[in-house]
Amino acid sequence: QMQLVESGGGLVQVGGSLRLSCAASGIIFSAAGMGWRRQAAGKQRELVATITSGGSTNYADSVKGRFTISRDNAKNTVFLQMNSLKPEDTAVYYCAAGGALARSWSYWGQGTQVTVSS
């Protein structure tokens, strides 16, 4: 059974850092593209970072230079390192798994809340 479980969210002050983790099971993780999407209250969903099965990464302009996505295939885990956090980063962050090129998504996690306080 496919499962994505996020962790690492929480409350942080402006300028702080958080590291999100997403543990995957039930898929061939090394062959999957992975990504992180966020949903803030009253705003559209935003795909913030993706990583292909080969390790190529892509970022939304809103997080470029501040967020880093990475993966550990030995642990079936994808990470999102978030630095220099801003209030507008406050959202529920969801992990996603899909095709190798990280352009289509088949599975989503349950989400983890990130709140940046000013």
Image: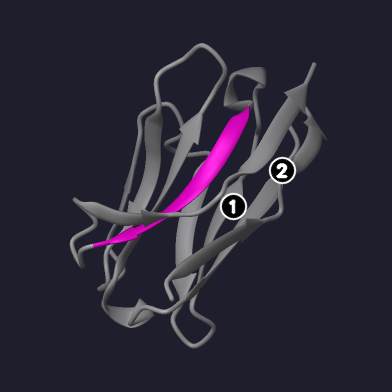
Query: In this orientation, does residue 14 appear?
Result: no
Give me the disc on residue 17.
2
Pointer 1: what residue?
81
Q: Quadrant of the N terminus?
A: bottom left
**On-image quarter of the C terminus:** top right
Q: How far apart, in angstroms, are the residues tagged by discs 1 and 2?
A: 7 Å
CB-based contact (under 8 Å), mark 1 and mark 2? yes
Range drawn in magenta: 91-98
- Give the structural element (helix, strand or loop) at label 2: loop
The count of marks equals: 2
Q: Left or right? Give the position of 43 relative to 34.
A: right
- Give 66 or 105, whichever is nearer the viewer: 105
Q: Is residue 57 visible?
A: yes
Between 81 and 77, the one lying in front of the other is: 77
The type of residue carrying mark 2 is: Ser
Residue 109 position, x and y percent, is 50, 54
**Residue in view at x 35 percent, y 34 percent:** 60
